[in-house]
Image (cartoon, rainbow, N blue to C red):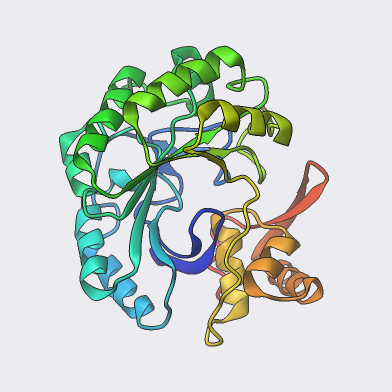
């Protein structure tokens, strides 16, 4: 299975061509809310998990076929674990004007070499969901070598050297990190980091743990108001509906479901289809054994069967 996927819909970025540099599910965290499931390889040890040259070859070929809104480093785990991420970012910048975004849990930014590797990105989007250690440990279940204060220090140092857009995602979970003490402490830390945007999120797809429960809209709005003008709610935000006629619909739908669980409405909205057509594509992928469906909070979600490639 290749390292480049999509373009797929992104609530924050529109039509995103993904670059996945680490194997499923290689990460320094094992977050309660993760839509990719439980971490199977929890690590802070960097490496070239996928050879850079093969990623570059695949990426260059894909960019000749499609014109995404953004090239996004994300997917199956923590992209900053890959020692060659800077080489891939540089390649993107040399062959296209498309912006580069990196979705990261922010846990490794205390390392100078990681900060340096990300400097050429246009957007870096770390997660910071709690600055209280007990809550941080409960939500993220981090690798034993990680320390919250060091992570916060890394975010502050990265802000000093990074000249692109730093947008911090806050994933809010009911009864865990949505209380006043949590939000006040978080606000103080965010003021020190001074990100460009504070993006409030909650559980919108089936999470890794049933402990992760979505926050209601009213509380999200209250927290947004408290955090000020930089804060925005991204949970449920609309995504781009554009697509190119040359894209294989079935493959695109599979790639969407392989990276995160989708509803019929998600597929219809992103691809500009009627819901009947979107459902037909999803059901055909189930019939082929590529997807499975499950219910969460009264809604039906479709996700990829582990180990399948979606090639039929």
Mark count:
0
Q: Residue 190 occupies which quadrant of the picture?
A: top left
Residue 92, image x and y in percent?
A: 27, 67
Residue 143 in view (yes/no): no
Quadrant showing the N terminus: bottom left
Residue in the image at 62% along x and 52% along y: 237
Horizontally, is 166 left or right of 238 in the view? left
Horizontally, is 182 left or right of 189 in the view? right
Residue 119, image x and y in percent?
A: 21, 49
Residue 262, image x and y in percent?
A: 67, 57
Q: Residue 10 occupies which quadrant of the picture?
A: bottom right
Quadrant showing the C terminus: bottom right
Of residues 51 and 18, the one drawn nearer to the viewer in this rendering: 18
Residue 12, image x and y in percent?
A: 51, 53
As drawn, 289 above or below 273: above
Of residues 103 and 144, the one drawn nearer to the viewer in this rendering: 103
Residue in the image at 28% along x and 74% along y: 96
Of residues 70 and 206, the one drawn nearer to the viewer in this rendering: 70
């Amino acid at each position: 299975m290749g390292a480049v996927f999509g373009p797929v819909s992104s609530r924050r970025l529109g039509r995103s061509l993904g670059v996945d540099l680490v194997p499923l599910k290689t990460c320094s965290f094992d977050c309660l809310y993760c839509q990719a499931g439980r971490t199977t390889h929890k690590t802070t040890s960097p490496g070239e998990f996928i050879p850079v040259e093969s990623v570059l070859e695949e990426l260059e070929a894909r960019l000749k076929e499609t014109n995404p809104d953004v090239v996004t480093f994300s997917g199956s785990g923590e992209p900053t674990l890959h020692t060659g991420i800077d080489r891939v970012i540089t390649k993107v910048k040399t062959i296209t004007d498309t912006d580069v975004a990196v979705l990261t849990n922010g846990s490794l930014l205390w390392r100078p070499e990681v900060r340096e590797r990300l400097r050429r990105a246009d957007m870096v989007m770390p997660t910071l969901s709690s600055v209280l250690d007990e809550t941080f440990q409960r939500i993220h279940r981090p690798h034993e070598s990680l320390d919250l204060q060091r992570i916060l220090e890394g975010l502050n140092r990265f802000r000093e050297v990074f000249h692109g857009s730093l947008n911090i995602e806050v994933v809010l979970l009911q009864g865990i990190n949505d209380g006043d003490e949590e939000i006040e402490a978080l606000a103080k830390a965010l003021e020190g980091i001074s990100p460009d945007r504070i993006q409030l999120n909650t559980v919108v797809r089936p999470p890794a743990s049933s402990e992760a429960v979505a926050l209601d809209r009213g509380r999200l709005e209250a927290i947004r108001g408290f955090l000020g003008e930089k804060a925005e709610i991204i949970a449920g935000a609309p995504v781009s509906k554009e697509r190119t006629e040359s894209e294989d619909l079935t493959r695109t739908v599979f790639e969407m479901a392989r990276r995160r669980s989708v509803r019929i409405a998600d597929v219809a909205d992103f691809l500009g289809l009627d819901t009947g057509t979107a459902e037909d594509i999803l059901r055909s992928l189930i019939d082929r054994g590529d997807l499975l469906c499950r219910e969460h909070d009264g809604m039906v979600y479709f996700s990829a069967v582990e180990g399948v490639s979606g090639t039929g």
